[in-house]
């Protein structure tokens, strides 16, 4: 069930990145964020019921399409499969009923759409709509986006897993919830820039050792250092690119990394009590 919900939220978020119509993109994004909540509820039930799970996902490359009609058809197929509720061991009956109710509504909305527009998220044109950018700047920015998109997905996975498993420290759980939310936002921003460049990449499963049997205190200490390092990388890239609009965005992200380090420090202080 956790795997299914991960695929659903990621597929719907990617659909929102790719779709050129903002109104429809917002529908996909809303549904994707609901599916993320579904995943968390499934994880919470399974932890409560002592059922182990992993955070593996299938390859998302079946979403590499050239039209919104094909994209919608693939999303509908995924949700139909999800409603069948395979592998729901450990998930409580009321939770499953909520999933079905939500997803039946999703299907009713998606089936009434008749969009059929071109998708340019993968054509590698490497230009931005409202920002002038040289090929060198585009390549540097794209390299950054590829690495950071996967990093943010990795962090979403780890923070979500920790949030579900740490049941006796509400302060730390709240920190992980904030961190996961910010990482989802960063994933969205990075992916949307990649779509503009025509260089969108899909995330992939991460090594189970990244989140299972994690020494939480050690992980937090290491990630505090990584966030501080990420702040410096954003500042260096902002200077290297030399584009005012992109530099402003990167400076914003750099300040976010500082805040993340503060949240990690806060979680660390609560867990060490």
Image (cartoon, rainbow, N blue to C red):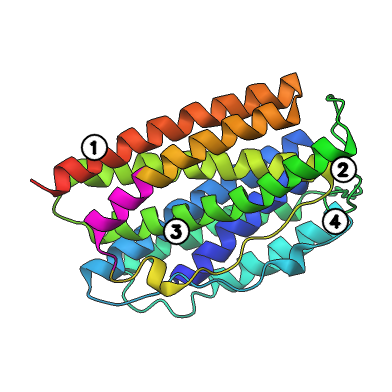
Badge 1 crowding class, 10 Å Cα cut-off, few under 14, some 14 to 19, many 20 or more, is: some
- Disc 4 from disc 3: Cα separation: 30 Å
- Give SS at disc 2: loop
Q: Which mark is residue 157?
A: 3
Tag 2 or tag 4, which sits nearer the N-term? Answer: 4
Label 4: which residue? 69
The magenta span reads 214-224
Tag 2 or tag 3, which sits nearer the N-term? Answer: 2
Instruction: Tell which of 111 and 221 is nearer to you.
Output: 221
Label 1: which residue? 266
Label 2: which residue? 126
- Could you tell whether 121 is left or right of 156 in the image? right
Instruction: Quadrant for residue 58, please give it.
Output: bottom right
Tag 3 or tag 4, which sits nearer the N-term? Answer: 4
- Disc 3 from disc 2: Cα separation: 29 Å
| Vertical comparison of 182 with 46: above or below | above
Residue sitting at x 58%, y 34%: 234
């Amino acid at each position: 069930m956790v795997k299914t919900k991960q695929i659903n939220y990621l597929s719907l978020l990617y659909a929102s990145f790719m779709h050129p119509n903002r109104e429809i993109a917002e529908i996909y994004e809303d549904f994707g964020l609901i599916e993320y909540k579904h995943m968390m509820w499934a994880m919470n039930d399974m932890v409560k019921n002592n059922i182990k799970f992993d955070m593996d996902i299938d390859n998302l490359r079946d979403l590499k399409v050239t039209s919104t009609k094909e994209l919608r058809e693939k999303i509908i197929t995924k949700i139909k499969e999800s409603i069948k509720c395979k592998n729901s061991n450990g998930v409580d009956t009321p939770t499953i009923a909520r999933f079905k109710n939500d997803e039946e509504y999703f299907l009713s909305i998606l089936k009434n759409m008749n969009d059929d527009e071109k998708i340019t998220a993968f054509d590698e044109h490497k230009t931005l709509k409202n920002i002038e950018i040289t090929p060198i700047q585009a390549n540097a920015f794209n390299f950054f986006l590829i690495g950071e998109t996967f990093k943010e997905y990795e962090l979403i996975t780890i923070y979500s897993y920790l949030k579900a498993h740490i049941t006796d420290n509400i302060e730390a759980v709240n920190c992980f919830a904030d961190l996961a939310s910010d990482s989802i936002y960063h994933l969205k921003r990075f992916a949307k820039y990649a779509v503009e460049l025509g260089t969108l990449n899909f995330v992939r499963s991460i090594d189970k050792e990244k989140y299972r049997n994690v020494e939480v205190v050690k992980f937090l200490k290491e990630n505090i250092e990584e966030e501080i390092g990420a702040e410096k990388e954003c500042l260096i890239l902002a200077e290297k690119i030399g584009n005012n609009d992109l530099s402003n965005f990167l400076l914003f992200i750099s300040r976010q990394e500082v805040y993340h380090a503060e949240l990690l420090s806060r979680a660390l202080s609560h867990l060490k009590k």
